[in-house]
Image (cartoon, rainbow, N blue to C red):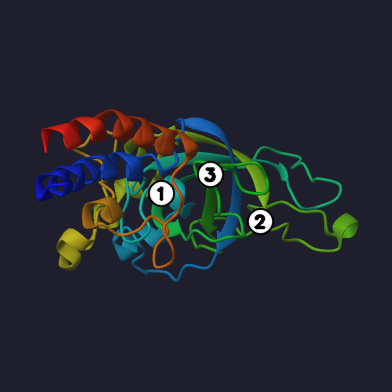
């Protein structure tokens, strides 16, 4: 078998690898059902997307890694804004339903790392344990969110923090809905980070105003520092099918 065959096959693998890797990210609709947790984000902290510290003075959230679109730094979800509405609690028994509708608009500025357990572990192959493919990790407490945003019934449950909520989400224009859009200092990314940051003021999904995947651009494994996440079944099937068709031809031409 000639060296030309190996060169051609290597070229084929390189050509198909971006396609296989790209299918690993969760492609989510503009509205749907998700889970919400919360985490502590210090005020003025510069999170994964590299958004300005001033953005933390307004509601922000991290998105689970495989929906975020990168295992580090920025991804296509950076800068997107969503209206999040509480539906009911997931872990409490019985589930708690808020007596009044509670919603807020957040900007995605951070990623919630992929793990084998937890609420940010959904992949394109399967949801988290609540059945959701998206988890919004709200930066809370925050000076921009009322302390009583999460309702509770301590007399019935014996505690006030339910931890995990089922929510509905709706993608919205940041310019029209996110409170921080009126403050120029809260928009964009930290200039000193240069190409290491990407935080559009109001991304629409078009390549001209939406962040690429830092992982894909730099050949970083989907799963971050750990092992490569296995591609979803459709990607493996397509890869095998194309290889089966082209491999004999490459061998013949070599």
Regarding residue 55, the answer to whether it shows in the image is yes
Q: How many marks?
A: 3
Q: Secondary structure at mark 3?
A: loop
Tell me the tag on residue 134.
3
Alpha-carbon span between mark 2 and mark 3: 24 Å
Q: Position of residue 179 (x, y in %)?
A: 40, 46
Residue 15 is drawn in which quadrant? top left
Left or right placement of residue 20 versus residue 106 in this view: left
Q: Earlier in the sequence, mark 2 or mark 3?
A: 3
Q: Secondary structure at mark 2?
A: loop
Q: Position of residue 176 (x, y in %)?
A: 36, 35
Tell me the tag on residue 148.
2
Query: Residue at position x 22%, y 52% from top?
Result: 217
Query: Residue at position x 29%, y 28% from top?
Result: 245
Residue with the mark numbered 1: 68
Mark toward the viewer: 2 or 3: 3
Q: Position of residue 234 (x, y in %)?
A: 45, 33
Q: Quarter of the image containing the C terminus?
A: top left
Tell me the tag on residue 20.
none
Q: Earlier in the sequence, mark 3 or mark 1?
A: 1
Q: Nearer the viewer, residue 238 or 10?
A: 10
Please say if 74 is above or below 212: below
Left or right placement of residue 154 versus residue 59 in this view: right
Category of crowding for the residue at label 3, using alpha-carbon neighbours closer than 10 angstroms: few (below 14), some (14–19), many (at least 20): many
Q: Secondary structure at mark 1?
A: helix
Alpha-carbon span between mark 3 and mark 1: 9 Å
Please say if 187 is above or below 52: above
Query: Residue at position x 32%, y 65% from top?
Result: 53
Q: Earlier in the sequence, mark 1 or mark 2?
A: 1
Q: Nearer the viewer, residue 114 or 190?
A: 114
Category of crowding for the residue at label 1, using alpha-carbon neighbours closer than 10 angstroms: few (below 14), some (14–19), many (at least 20): many
Category of crowding for the residue at label 2, using alpha-carbon neighbours closer than 10 angstroms: few (below 14), some (14–19), many (at least 20): few
């Amino acid at each position: 078998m000639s060296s030309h065959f190996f060169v051609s096959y290597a070229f084929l693998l390189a050509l198909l690898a971006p396609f296989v890797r790209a299918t690993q990210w969760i492609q989510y609709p503009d509205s749907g059902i998700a889970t919400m947790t919360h985490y502590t984000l210090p005020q003025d902290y510069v999170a994964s997307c590299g958004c300005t510290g001033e953005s933390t003075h307004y509601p922000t959230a991290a998105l689970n890694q495989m929906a975020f679109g990168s295992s580090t730094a920025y991804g296509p979800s950076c800068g997107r804004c969503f209206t999040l509405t509480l539906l009911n609690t997931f872990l409490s028994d019985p589930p708690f339903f808020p007596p009044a509708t509670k919603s807020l608009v957040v900007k995605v500025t951070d990623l919630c790392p992929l793990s084998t357990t937890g609420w940010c572990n959904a992949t394109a192959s399967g949801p988290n344990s609540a059945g959701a493919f998206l988890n919004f990790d709200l930066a809370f407490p925050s000076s921009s969110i009322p302390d009583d945003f999460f309702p509770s019934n301590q007399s019935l449950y014996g505690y006030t923090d339910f931890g995990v909520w089922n929510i509905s989400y709706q993608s919205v224009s940041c310019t029209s809905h996110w409170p921080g859009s009126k403050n120029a200092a809260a928009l964009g990314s930290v200039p000193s980070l240069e190409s290491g940051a990407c935080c559009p003021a109001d991304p629409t999904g078009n390549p001209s105003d939406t962040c690429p995947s830092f992982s894909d651009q730099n050949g970083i494994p989907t799963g971050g520092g750990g092992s490569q996440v296995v591609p979803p079944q459709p990607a493996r099937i397509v890869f095998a099918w194309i290889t089966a068709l082209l491999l004999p031809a490459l061998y013949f031409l070599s």
